[in-house]
Amino acid sequence: MAVRMDLFESPDYYQLDELLSEEHLMVRSAVRDYVKTAISPIIEDYAQKAEFPQQIIKQLGDIGCFGPTVPVEYGGGGLDYISYGIMMQELERGDSGVRSTASVQGSLVMYPIHAYGSEEQKKKYLPKLASGEWLGCFGLTEPNHGSDPGGMLTNIKDAGDHVILNGAKMWISNAPFAQVAVVWAKNEEGKIVGLIVERGMEGFTTPTTHNKWSLRASATGELVFDNVKVPKENILPNVIGLKGPLGCLSKARYGIAWGTLGAAMDCYDTALKYSMERVQFGKPIAGFQLQQKKLAEMLTEITKGQLLVWRLGVLMNQGKATPAQISMAKRNSCEIATQIARDARQMLGGMGITGEYSIMRHMMNLESVITYEGTHDIHLLITGMDITGLNAFK
């Protein structure tokens, strides 16, 4: 197998690096170096085989990509939200599935345990998740309830010192390899609660989802609960209702807003380099007007996106970012990245569909990313409701 050289250069047209601290730049350098040496050389082969590179779990823990904003006392990095965003940008520049692994672990598993869990739960689970010793997953979406999670059928019934969990979740990243799952279910009063379900509990299975055209190097599966006995001490004590899982999704969507810009940057950089080297009609195709139009528009949208997520990161650090603001950034980054990937693919002609270049893999991955954690349309409606005060969901 030929070793793939990763020659990525990050676009920074508006000198936004000047807005970043020394710590931010060190974080970016560390994760970028990791992606160049450990992800880029292998990811095309894993994607072609539709196989998850399990070795990255420990590696991501070692470089601090799991729960970077979680306090150090629980094994996290104690970093700010711009650092977290930068990490997700660099990981997704390598592959959306790699970023998904980290997003789920940090925002959807570690965050709810830290925010909603007991001190005993935090001490038991967070250090092992932070180090990559354990992998976690997040069970919200069901076969018949995606954009409307409040309609979930998964439920728990009181049985003394434990509860009995029944139901099923699907489209769950990390599920096939996860040791723990943060699962959302309705109690007997119909209120949504969170539980920590551990692999090995009788009646808990995680069938793998096959035949995906997208996120092929990411592990996706189902969570099936058949009369699973879950100890009551595994219930998250400090949240009830849909605000629990939605709070987690806000953190994950924030990471996606940064992450998908990384995929867009990779497609832009690939198209730019290729267009400078590919000669047609006696000159590099970068010299033709229509190719320059594509490149100029790509860079403009990337630059606008960089400004959007940086400002959002400042608001996150100040505790002022709203879920609607996060929705806007998630939707925008996903939309522009999807379009940039498509335009970049066209610039490479037939070479654009091969695994020699990252663009087609990014294109396929982004079709999932624009759908999960709130679809393009749902995020438009979240923004619409925020600016009009009128709920179009009902």
Image (cartoon, rainbow, N blue to C red):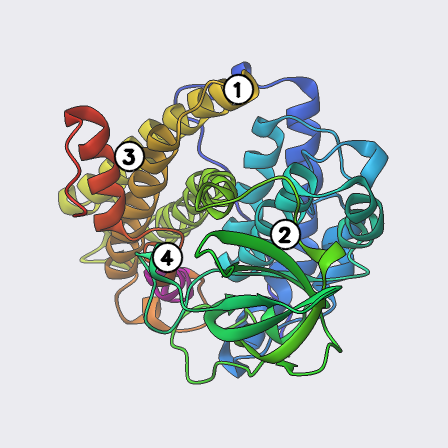
- Rounded to the nearest angstrom, the CA distance separating label 1 from label 2 is 20 Å
Marks 4 and 3: CB-CB under 8 Å?
no
Q: Quadrant of residue 120?
A: top right
How far apart are labels 2 and 3 at the CA level?
Answer: 32 Å
**Nearer to the camera, 57 or 295:** 57
Chain-order first, disc 4 or disc 1:
4
Precedes in sequence: disc 4 or disc 3: 4
Contact between marks 2 and 3 (CB within 8 A): the answer is: no
Q: Nearer the viewer, mark 4 or mark 3?
A: 4
Work out which quarter of the rendered image holds the N terminus and state it. Answer: bottom right
- Cα separation between marks 4 and 1: 26 Å
- Queried whether the magenta region covers residue 143, the answer comes back as no
Per the image, label 2 sits on a secondary structure element best described as helix
Q: In this figure, which residue is indicated by the disc labeled 2?
A: 109
Residue position marked by numbered label 3 in the rendering: 301
Q: Nearer the viewer, residue 231 or 131?
A: 231
Query: Which amino acid type corresponds to the residue marked 3 in the rendered image?
Result: Glu
Horizontally, residue 200 falls left or right of residue 294, namely: right
What amino acid is found at the position of numbered circle 2 in the picture? Val
Residue 297 percent across, percent down from the top left: 23, 37
Circle 1 sits on which residue?
319
Mark 1 vs mark 3: give the one in front: 1
Q: Residue at x 32, y 71 (%)?
A: 144
Question: What is the magenta range?
Answer: 359-367
User: Label 4: which residue?
Assistant: 149
Which residue type carries mark 1? Gly
Question: Residue 187, position in %: x, y?
Answer: 52, 59
